[in-house]
Image (spheres, grey):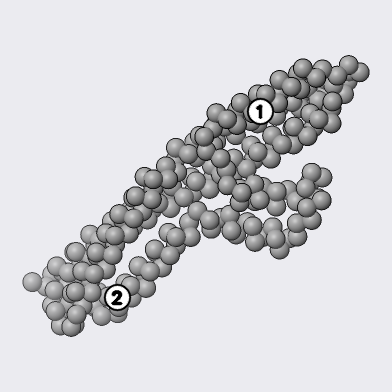
Amino acid sequence: MSSYLITLRDDLWRTSSARYNAARRLKRKELFSTISLAFFSALAIALAVIQQIYTAQIEAAPGLSSYITAISTLSGIFILVISLMEWGSRNGSNADALYKNAQELNALRQKICLQISKEQASSLPNWSVATEHLRTYEQIQDRCDINHAPIDDGYFVSQHRNSPEFKAKQISDWDARRLSALWHLSSIWYYLIFWSVMIVALVPIVMMIDFLSFLMCGGFVS
């Protein structure tokens, strides 16, 4: 029976670790969502202020005023899109649920480790205990409506590729680095796209308005 309990212990280790990874990934996603909302909100306000302060320079550049208005509108669209995505995905609450479930699974794993030690010290296997542990394992998993993604499990396995449990998978260092990069980027790649689009869009504004001369003059253009 010890071999069965060891298999169950390893399954718990893998599942709980994957769910810890999922919770971390979703928390990172929530953080980037908050940062993005703050960035685009501040940018929309800054663009409105720039249009008021640098009126003369903006009017002297054909089409610049309309361009700034378009960028400000784009910033508002990004705010709306990110807000709807965050509201629909519930990343924060899902991360908390996955973390709590992983904690329960890890606690059960500790009990099974203790049971394995008892079984190894005794010549009388207790299958009823093993059955009860399996039932508890299934109940804990069922209590969490949110499951981890395959990439969370893949990342865990790649990080423990040299463990006896996963050596048979023969995961190379290159595959491990690739999975690590994919896992880290999986929750933030579209935020990076939003930021990149906005930064590129801001370049013409920065190039066409002489911010430094205004600061050196220390006055507002009416």
Judge whether residue 162 can be spotted in this image: no
Which residue sits at x=65%, y=51%?
A: 155
Category of crowding for the residue at label 2, using alpha-carbon neighbours closer than 10 angstroms: few (below 14), some (14–19), many (at least 20)? few
Residue 149 visible within the image: yes
Above or below: residue 48 compared with residue 101 = below
Residue indicated by mark 2: 206
Q: Is residue 217 left or right of residue 109?
A: left
Q: Residue 55, image x and y in percent? A: 13, 74
The quadrant of the image that shows the N terminus is: top right
Q: Mark 1 falls on what kind of element?
A: helix
For image coordinates 43% across by 49% down, the residue present is 31
- Left/right placement of residue 24 relative to residue 2 reads left
Residue 137, disc: 1
Asked which secondary structure carries label 2, the reply is helix
User: Is label 2 or label 1 in front?
Assistant: 1
> Residue flagged by tag 1: what amino acid is it?
Tyr
Work out whether residue 57 or residue 186 is closer to the camera in this orientation and state it.
186
Residue, far right: 123
Instruction: Please give the name of the residue rendered at 75% of the width and 60% of the height, measured from the top-left corner.
Output: 172
Residue closer to the observer: 52 or 144: 144
122 to 207, vertically: above or below = above
- Res 130 → quadrant: top right
Vertical comparison of 172 with 220: above or below: above
Residue 136 occupies quadrant: top right
